[in-house]
Image (tube, rainbow, N blue to C red):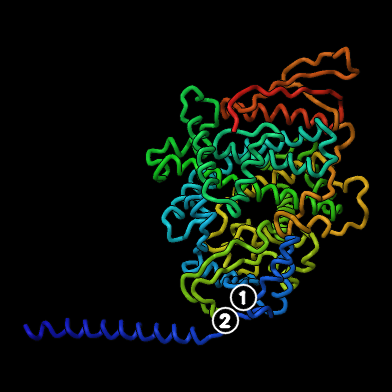
């Protein structure tokens, strides 16, 4: 009996020794890491640190070139002290891979944002939630399942085709709109917001003057600037849409396969605890998706202005594939140069130049430097994208740099060789953007159709050469053009006045020398089957305009149906 217990005692002794050894090693490692120095920091005030420099740059929203200068002087990882808060900027692809991807288990938290996360959003916004909050991982899972997976993104392509066709129609139906950069930006906002509102709530935004556009955009800004009453107002706005979807008298007046209707039909409510939580999330998704899509389209127009040779080549390659037919997303595979243009837009003008902060939950040791627990890490997409060691001629918009890169952005993100990563527009680690597949489709369709239908030129009277700072300064989004971008969308030949009826005869208006056509388009399709029909009507219109065969005015009549 005594002998049988001996092996057990010996085994327990070995386990205890191993645990003690690991504990001592861990303590030594922790102690050793504490002895390591912190990353370098730019010289600043003893009390305020670099706060005054950041505030001065923020007046013109030009923080990114300031941090870029510090990165060149101090290296891959720097710390910037802003009075009591210290921010850490990751300025190389290697630093991002090590500290956000490989260390994602301990670098994926968010700061405690009391106003925006706790008061305004009541801790329901997936972008702001702490990683340790189970709702964060659950919301990402639901977003993927009902909205951003490849099958769902493909299923929503008709909405993107429909809204971009309406955008083209808006410009060609009102040539003055294409002459005003502010109006062009507003039309882009309408179609991006409407596309994502349709995908999430199942309802659209039909008019460019719809106050919903300003309401949603203001809500996004308010998450930084406003207070508790904002959450109550936003939640009530979402609940009104929730009740419309649940109203049996409005069945068929919204898209049943949209995100929120699908979640409400699910047996487990998409694992949401309440219908209110399920209704609130789409608003946050619209803010994140529509604003970034709008920014990318606007930056694309800036690139086409500055680099007309790229514009001409891209248009030629589009026309070689589609001819007079309106491009669709499926055409992207046969136009590889457009894929290069897309990647270059995201590299050249990343829509989140300095990144949303990740917070570390433990010390990280990187290159013999210690990034402490609780550090705010920023993926400095601007500096990485404009690093001459990484990209030849980084300030030049040059899609040809991606000619031999045949990977998708997600394949590039997941590559073990970070030097091959194409860009960092969608973040890194466990906080990377979950909407890439939707963004890719939206971006591709917008680029192909704008180039196919219009010539992007400087606004009349613009003094040459144009200093980019005239429209980059004081932009809402650092590193991207403001609404002051002097852009014009010029239609080809007689494109401006060409209109087409949908299965209706053309009649002559006695008060006009032109034929007068009528086409009634419902504000909100009654069924998913309507969407392709509506698209075909607009497509036929625009394709006829492209060929310049006839001239016809159209009245676009909206039916009164439920809208957002």
Mark 1 closeness class: few <14, some 14–19, many ≥20 residues within 10 Å: many
- Going 86% across and 24% down the picture, which residue do you hit? 551
Where residue 511 appears, x then y in whole percent?
A: 88, 14
Where residue 145 appears, x then y in whole percent?
A: 48, 46
Element class at badge 1: strand
Q: Quadrant of the N terminus?
A: bottom left
- Residue hosting label 1: 79
Res 4 → quadrant: bottom left
Where residue 193 appears, x then y in whole percent?
A: 64, 41
Q: Nearer the viewer, residue 230 or 484?
A: 230
Q: Is residue 278 left or right of residue 176?
A: left
Can the viewer see residue 78?
no
Q: Nearer the viewer, residue 15 or 318?
A: 15
Q: Nearer the viewer, residue 277 or 262?
A: 277
- In the rendered image, the vertical position of residue 305 relative to residue 30, given as above or below: above
Disc nearer the start of the sequence (1/2)? 2
Q: Is residue 234 left or right of residue 20?
A: right
Count all numbered tags in the image, as a single digit.
Answer: 2
Q: Which mark is residue 353?
A: none
Q: Which mark is residue 38?
A: 2
- Going 65% across and 24% down the picture, which residue do you hit? 522
Mark 2 closeness class: few <14, some 14–19, many ≥20 residues within 10 Å: some
């Amino acid at each position: 009996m005594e002998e049988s217990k001996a092996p057990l005692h010996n085994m327990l002794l070995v386990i205890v020794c191993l645990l003690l050894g690991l504990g001592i090693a861990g303590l030594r490692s922790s102690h050793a890491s504490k002895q390591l120095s912190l990353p370098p920091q730019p010289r600043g005030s003893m009390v305020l640190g670099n706060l005054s420099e950041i505030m001065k740059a923020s007046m013109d929203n030009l923080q990114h070139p300031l941090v870029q200068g510090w990165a060149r002087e101090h290296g891959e990882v720097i710390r910037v002290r802003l009075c009591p808060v210290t921010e850490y900027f990751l300025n190389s692809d290697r630093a991002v891979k090590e500290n956000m991807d490989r260390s994602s288990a301990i670098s994926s938290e968010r700061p405690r944002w009391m106003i925006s996360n706790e008061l305004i959003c009541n801790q329901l916004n997936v972008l702001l939630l702490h990683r340790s909050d189970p709702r964060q991982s659950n919301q990402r899972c639901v977003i993927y399942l009902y909205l951003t997976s490849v099958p769902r993104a493909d299923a929503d392509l008709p909405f993107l085709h429909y809204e971009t066709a309406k955008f083209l129609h808006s410009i060609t139906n009102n040539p003055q709109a294409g002459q005003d950069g502010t109006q062009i930006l507003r039309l882009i906002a309408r179609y991006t917001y409407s596309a994502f509102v349709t995908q999430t709530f199942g309802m659209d935004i039909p008019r460019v003057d719809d106050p919903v556009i300003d309401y949603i955009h203001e809500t996004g800004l308010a998450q930084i600037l406003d207070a508790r009453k904002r959450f109550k107002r936003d939640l009530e706005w979402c609940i009104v849409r929730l009740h419309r979807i649940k109203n049996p008298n409005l069945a068929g007046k919204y898209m049943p396969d949209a995100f929120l209707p699908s979640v409400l039909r699910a047996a487990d409510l998409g694992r949401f605890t309440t219908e209110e939580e399920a209704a609130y999330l789409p608003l946050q998704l619209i803010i994140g998706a529509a604003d970034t899509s709008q920014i990318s389209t606007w930056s694309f127009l800036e690139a086409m202005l500055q680099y007309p040779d790229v514009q001409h080549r891209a248009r030629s390659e589009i026309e070689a594939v589609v001819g007079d037919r309106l491009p669709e997303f499926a055409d992207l595979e046969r136009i590889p140069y457009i894929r290069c243009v897309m990647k270059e837009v995201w590299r050249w003008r990343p829509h989140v130049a300095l990144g949303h902060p990740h917070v570390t939950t433990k010390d990280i040791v990187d290159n013999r430097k210690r990034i402490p627990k609780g550090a705010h890490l920023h993926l400095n997409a601007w500096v990485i994208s404009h690093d001459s060691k990484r990209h030849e001629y980084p300030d030049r918009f040059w899609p040809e740099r991606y000619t031999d890169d045949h990977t998708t952005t997600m394949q590039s993100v997941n590559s073990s060789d970070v030097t091959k990563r194409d860009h960092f527009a969608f973040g890194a680690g466990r906080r990377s953007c979950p909407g890439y597949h939707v963004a890719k489709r939206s971006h591709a369709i917008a680029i192909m159709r704008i180039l196919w239908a219009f010539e992007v030129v400087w606004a009349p009277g613009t003094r040459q050469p144009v200093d980019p700072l005239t429209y980059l300064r004081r932009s809402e989004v650092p590193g991207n053009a403001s609404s002051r971008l002097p852009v014009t969308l010029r239609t080809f030949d007689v494109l401006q006045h060409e209109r087409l009826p949908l299965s209706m005869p053309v009649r002559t208006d006695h008060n006009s020398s032109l034929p007068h056509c009528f086409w009634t388009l419902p504000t909100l399709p009654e069924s998913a089957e309507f969407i392709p029909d509506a698209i075909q009507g607009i497509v036929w219109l625009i394709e006829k305009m492209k060929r310049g065969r006839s001239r016809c005015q159209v009245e676009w009549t909206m039916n009164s149906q439920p809208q957002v």
